[in-house]
Amino acid sequence: MSICTVCQAFGISQTWSMDFMHDQLADGRSIRLFNVIDDYNRQGLCINVDFSLPALRVIRSLEQIIEWRGQPKVLRCDNGPEYVSTVRYDWLTHHLFESVAEVQNFATQWLWTYNHERPNWHWEA
């Protein structure tokens, strides 16, 4: 697997993009979000939420996705695809969350909707 800043995906699981976001809970505590998306079909592969996301946690998340999807040829690490900003403005700024668990639950539900109910969406085998 290589790391790239400018790559084009020609098939599922060839190129993934990963990015971090940050926000705050209603009580002002900072939270971090780790996002991974398949660049070819724009499928969201994970959104992990916690107060801290150290390297070992990120590695564990990537290993879980690799178990599920296989290893990508390229992992892009940049400012992230536009879907990250969609997540932030669609729900992070419109809700006051009380806990990391509440954010994670909402993120998981949002990811399912993003992957399964978007207009003009189609999955390739």
Image (cartoon, rainbow, N blue to C red):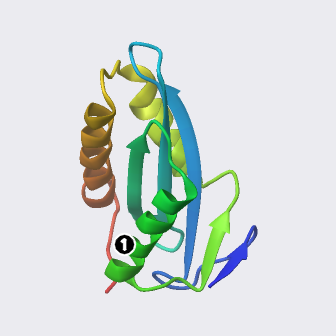
Q: Position of residue 34 (x, y in %)?
A: 49, 51
The image shows residue 41, relative to residue 9, as above or below, that is above
The image shows residue 75, relative to residue 70, as above or below, that is above
Image-based side of 105 in relation to 36, left or right: left
Residue positioned 31% across, 41% down in the render: 104
Q: Quadrant of the N terminus?
A: bottom right
Residue positioned 33% across, 52% down in the render: 114
Image-based side of 18 in relation to 68, left or right: right
Report helix, strand or loop for mark 1: helix
Residue 22 visible in this rendered orientation of the protein: yes
Q: Residue furthest top?
A: 27
Task: Write down the quadrant of residue 25 in the picture.
Answer: top left
Residue 42 visible in this rendered orientation of the protein: no
Q: Position of residue 85 (x, y in %)?
A: 55, 40
Q: For the residue marked with disc 1, what is the amino acid?
A: Gln
**Other residues around mark 1 within 10 Å, as few (<14) / some (14–19) / many (≥20):** few
Q: Which residue is at the front of the view, 123 or 43?
A: 43
Residue positioned 46% across, 58% down in the render: 57
Q: Quadrant of the C terminus?
A: bottom left
Q: Which residue is at the front of the view, 58 or 66?
A: 58
Residue positioned 47% across, 15% down in the render: 28
Q: Position of residue 52 (x, y in %)?
A: 50, 41
- Residue at the disc numbered 1: 64
Image-based side of 77 in relation to 29, left or right: right
Q: Position of residue 88 (x, y in %)?
A: 49, 35
